[in-house]
Structure formats: structure tokens, C-alpha cells
Amino acid sequence: MKQKKVILADNSWIVHSIRDFNGSPVRRIGDEWMLVTAGSTEDDPGNWNTMTASWGHFGVLWGKDVAVMFIRPSRYTREFADTNQLFTLSFFDKSHRDALSFCGEKSGRDLDKAAETGLTPIVFGSGTAGGKITGAVGFKEASEIIVCKKIYTQDIIPDNFLDPDIGKVFYPKQDYHRMYVGEALALMTCK
């Protein structure tokens, strides 16, 4: 299903480095969650999808600041992550916990998540961050949005688990995640 059309992000968004991210990434991702959003709005402003994630990390790889996310094959967002170069990680305050729960339980194949949750999808235009994040979709209500350019993907290989319980506990259906490594192009915060 097409998602709610995005609106252009206004000039209240400020560009920072991911190194200025506020708080512990372990707490922010694992406990507070984030929305992973991918798609391209150049030809169709409703051509994107989002999902809730509580797995991921930040760091440095190949001399670049990176963010890493994981998506199972059953998730609709994976189609968008596979076919587009940019993705975002949006972080919210506690008042949006119900919206994040909804986005983790429901599929964008069946409904418009933004319309159902009241979240406002925004797209960054060519005048933001020197044009390098043009087309990236985030949410107006987010406190922070990390915009990434995909630089590597890898499917989880079950034969590589050194702890056999990981496969048993997290993959009883053998629906192994795909890992996406993105160069962190910008950390966006609103004034």
C-alpha cells in the first residue's frame, strides 16, 4: 500500500555529525526503539515504508562513521531498503511509544502507518546537507534522524553462529535478517 505522501522538511532541521548523537545507542535503540525508513520519493511521494527496530548499532567501519540495521525477509520495508540507496533511523521521545509499537506490529503492505499513527512523514530536499540526503524520508515528530547511504549488505549466515542458541531463540522460522551498513551522512535535529 502506498504510504502517506511526504511533505518537504522545513528549515528548522539542523545538520550534525552522528558523533553528536544524544545518549547511549544501546539504550536508545534497544530500549526506546527507532523507526527504520527506506524508499524513494522522487517519482512518487508515497513510495516508502517504515518499520520499528530494536536491533542495530553505530560505529566506525572502513574509515567511515556508520549505522547498521537489520531487516527480516518478511518485512515490507526490506523491499525498499534493497532497492534504494538512502535509509533513515528516526528516534522519538516516550510520547510516541504507541506509534512505534504500531509500526512494529502492522505492515505497510496493508495500511498507511503514518496516517494510522498520526506521524508526519517528511523528506529532505536538495538544499539540506549539501544535497547528499535529498529524498531521505523521516518524521517531523522525531527528536533525531540519522540519514544513511547504504554501503554494504550481508545476509545473516546461520552456519556462522558460534552460539547455537541464537539460531534457536531468534530464528525458529529460519527467517534470517539482512544486515545493512550505511554511511552516516547526517544527524538531523529540529530547532
Image: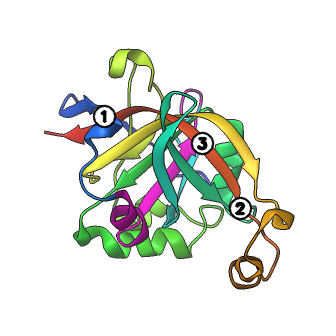
User: Pointers 2 and 3 in contact (CB under 8 A)?
Assistant: no
Residue at the disc numbered 2: 177
**For the point 31% across and 38% down, which residue is it?**
19
In this picture, residue 75 sits left or right of residue 13:
right
- The one of 157 and 111 positioned closer to us in this rendering: 157
**For the point 55% across and 38% down, which residue is it?**
182
In this picture, residue 149 sits left or right of residue 24:
right
Whether 32 is among the magenta residues is yes
Q: Earlier in the sequence, mark 3 or mark 1?
A: 1
**For the point 71% across and 43% down, which residue is it?**
153
Tag 3's secondary structure? Answer: strand
Residue span colored magenta: 25-43
The correct choice, above or below, for 53 with respect to 98 in the image is above
Residue at the disc numbered 1: 9
Question: Mark 3 belongs to which amino acid?
Answer: Val
> Which numbered marker is on residue 181?
3
Residue 65 x/y as whole percent = 45, 34
Whether 34 is among the magenta residues is yes
Q: Residues within 10 Å of mark 2 (few under 14, many from 20)?
A: some
Tag 2's secondary structure? Answer: loop
The correct choice, above or below, for 30 with respect to 22 in the image is below
Q: Residues within 10 Å of mark 3 (few under 14, many from 20)?
A: many
Question: Mark 2 belongs to which amino acid?
Answer: His
The picture quadrant where one finds residue 23 is bottom left
Question: Mark 1 and mark 2: span between their CA atoms?
Answer: 31 Å
The picture quadrant where one finds residue 24 is bottom left
